[in-house]
Image: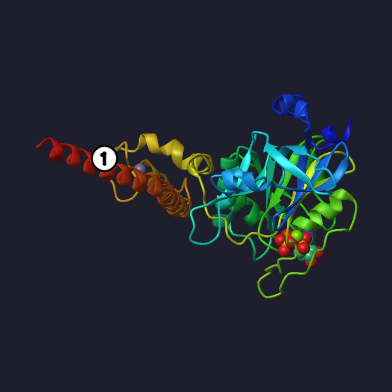
Amino acid sequence: MGILEDWGWDARWAEAFGGDAAQGHFPARLIEEQRGLFQIISEQGVKSARTPGNMRHKAADRAGLPAVGDWVSAEAVPNEKVVLIRRILPRRTKLSRKAAGETMEEQVIAANLDTVLVMTALNADFNARRLERFLTVSRESGAEPVLILNKLDACAEPDPFLAEARQAAGDAAVVAVSAKTGAGLDALSAWIKPGRTVGLIGSSGVGKSTLVNRLAGNQDLKTAETRRSDERGRHTTTHRQLFILPGGGILLDTPGMREMQFWDAEQGLKKTFDDIEALAPSCRFKDCVHGSEPGCAVKAAIEAGALAAERLASWAKLKHESEHEASRREAPAATEKQKWKTIHKAARKRIKEKRK
Ligand SMILES: Nc1nc2c(ncn2[C@@H]2O[C@H](COP(=O)(O)OP(=O)(O)OP(=O)(O)O)[C@@H](O)[C@H]2O)c(=O)[nH]1
Ligand SMILES: [Mg+2]
Ligand SMILES: [Zn+2]
């Protein structure tokens, strides 16, 4: 196997790359991003890369720019060490969130992940509601989500956590591990395999870099102790990077994410709340929002103890947020439409008046 195959290259990527070689381009994978500076891996090894100015201008938004995990068509520049990224091959999966701040912009956290390991620690960090949010974003990406409960070694009573995690996870697998002692890590071989790309996400301090260090068999990545009071991490990892493991498999370490605002979440939500989705058709009203409507099957399930009330509350909150973001995304387009309507109307009026 060549270098590219180790990093996940296959016949489908070769097809997507197509005839770019005829233009002197070569295929590469973006393995690291640090403040707009990229590292790519190709048959020629690791090189720094940048996007040409016209790519930055042409990209309608940030999602049109390269992200870690992307396969790209690259070109060497004479007398320059840094190569140019000419084209992003169509992404198979895309893990996105709304960029921080007031702008309505999509931020691609990583591209072409096969699996997303949503990690939490079995301590004060554990929050089922936040896990539902992370799982929703992971499902929306097109990758398979897996819930990882870390720090099993330091947890006296994992069972209640496990029960809550299973409910939040729906059809996603739940795996309890200790990145420190190695307990439970064998189970991860179901996802971490040669040529497969697995991303780690979760809040700061849950042990993402510790896990990468352990699986990669080195201690290269910086890790740091969490605060005693609330187990919060110190945002030790500051950039996204892909690592290749000795036994094969590609692992992405990311900085701890406090915020995971939805970009597009509709499909992800349906899957994360498949228990509620399954009950909805039994509600009396087709458009039941499981609020105060009579004959609500979801409410009935809660009363019967078959569904946790927190699930419904969480679903309602996330659904509201998802719809709100969707309407904000569409708003600029609507304004544009309105603008043209006004222009056309004015033009028609002028024509009419000329005829008079
Ligand atoms: N007891 C115990 N401690 C762990 C385990 N995994 C990680 N830790 C500790 O948790 C702390 C945080 O680990 P990191 O790997 O830096 O966490 P991170 O998720 O990479 O954090 P950020 O880079 O800030 O996002 C370190 O002190 C680790 O030694 C575990 O399985 N058990
Ligand atoms: Mg880290
Ligand atoms: Zn209902």
Residue at left offset 88%, top offset 42%: 45
Quarter where residue 90 is shown: top right
Horizontal side, residue 196 vs residue 172: left or right: right
Residue 21 locus on image (x, y percent): 78, 28
Structural crowding at the residue carrying mark 1, measured as other residues with C-alpha within 10 Å and reported as few (<14), some (14–19) or many (≥20)? few
Quarter where residue 159 is shown: bottom right
Residue 329 locus on image (x, y percent): 44, 48
Q: Quadrant of the C terminus?
A: top left
The amino acid marked with disc number 1 is His
Query: In this rendering, does residue 341 appear at all?
Result: yes
Q: From the viewer's perspective, is residue 41 above or below residue 123?
A: above
Horizontal side, residue 188 vs residue 348: left or right: right
Name the residue that disc number 1 marks.
344
Q: Residue furthest bottom?
A: 229
21 and 205: which is toward the camera: 21
Residue at left offset 80%, top offset 64%: 223
Residue at left offset 90%, top offset 43%: 246
Horizontal side, residue 319 vs residue 292: left or right: right
Q: From the viewer's perspective, is residue 275 above or below residue 313?
A: above
For ligand 3, which image quadrant applies?
top left
Residue at left offset 55%, top offset 60%: 100
125 and 90: which is toward the camera: 90
